[in-house]
């Protein structure tokens, strides 16, 4: 929707809330809408395999990006155990498999998940937009160059198991700035000594902006930016 509210009372510029579909990059969403605006960008990148809330900023200033990036984010998704991939999600190349010997109980799973709540050190995925030597990590990784992103201190406010039917975990996570949910999945698998990768991911909220307020890409391309539009829910 066209949104004039704020994120924790920090922002009052016009933004567009988009329910990004699977298969599109955040940049592709911005590029599709770009002809309609003098200046446009997005805050809070979503990977192509993920769906959910993407905040698009129009006629923005740099401060808006910083404010939205600092907002708390909420996700729900699925993690598959027994498989590790180079991208930490199901779109990547399988690097390890173990389905036979290590099937954690729900009790052990929930206990391990709690270890990731709080202020933690996290390694970003080697396939990410972070830079090393002036080049993006995913570009280096695709060339076969080994990258080791430095650990970052991040905050995870909530990481909980909603359902567990081995090998799939359905989870909810509420996180602060800089957290990679793919890394949470990967690190959980390493801690359980079985391997894990992200199977699906959907972002439900950034600050007080919710995906239930957002427009689909199709609605935006047809009419959503013209006037004061209703939410599609």
Image (tube, helix red, strand yellow):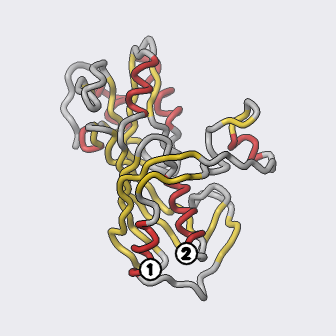
Does residue 189 sit above or below 209 in this rendering?
below
Q: Residue at x 38, y 46 (%)?
A: 52
Q: Residue at x 45, y 14 (%)?
A: 39
**Residue 70 at what x, y percent from top left?**
40, 34
Q: From the image, tell me which residue sits under label 2.
A: 192
Circles 2 and 1: CB atoms closer than 8 Å: yes
In terms of sequence position, does the residue under pointer 2 or pointer 1 come before the other? 1
Q: 225 left or right of 24?
A: left
Q: In the rendered view of the protein, which quadrant contains the N terminus? A: top left
Q: Residue lying furthest bottom in this view?
A: 101
Q: 47 left or right of 210?
A: right
Does residue 112 sit above or below 179 in this rendering?
below
Q: In the rendered view of the protein, which quadrant contains the C terminus? A: top left
Q: Quadrant of residue 177?
A: top left
Q: Nearer the viewer, residue 114 or 202?
A: 114
Q: Residue at x 44, y 26 (%)?
A: 66
Residue 108 — which label?
1
Q: 219 left or right of 168?
A: left
Instruction: Tell me if mark 1 has few (under 14), some (14-19) or many (20+) residues whose alpha carbon lies within 10 angstroms of its own.
Output: few
Residue 231 — which label?
none
């Amino acid at each position: 929707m066209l949104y004039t509210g704020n994120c924790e009372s920090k922002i009052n510029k016009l933004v567009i809330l988009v329910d990004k579909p699977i298969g599109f990059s955040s940049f592709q969403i911005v590029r599709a809408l770009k002809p309609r605006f003098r200046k446009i960008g997005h805050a809070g990148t979503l990977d192509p395999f993920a769906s959910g809330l993407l905040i698009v900023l129009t006629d923005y200033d740099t401060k808006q990006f910083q404010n939205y990036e600092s907002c708390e984010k909420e996700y729900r998704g699925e993690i598959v155990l027994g498989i590790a991939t180079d991208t930490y999600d199901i779109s990547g190349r399988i690097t390890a498999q173990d389905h036979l010997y290590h099937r954690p109980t729900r009790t052990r799973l929930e206990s391990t998940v709690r270890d990731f709540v709080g202020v933690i050190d996290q390694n970003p995925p080697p396939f990410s937009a972070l830079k090393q030597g002036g080049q993006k990590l995913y570009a280096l990784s695709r060339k076969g160059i080994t990258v080791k992103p430095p650990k970052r201190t991040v905050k995870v406010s909530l990481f909980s198991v909603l359902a567990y039917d081995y090998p799939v975990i359905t989870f909810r996570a509420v996180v602060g700035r800089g957290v990679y949910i793919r890394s949470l999945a990967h690190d959980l698998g390493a801690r359980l000594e079985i391997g894990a990768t992200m199977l699906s991911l959907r972002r439900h909220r950034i600050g007080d902006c919710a995906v239930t307020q957002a427009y689909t890409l199709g609605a935006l391309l047809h009419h959503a930016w013209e006037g004061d539009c209703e939410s599609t829910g």
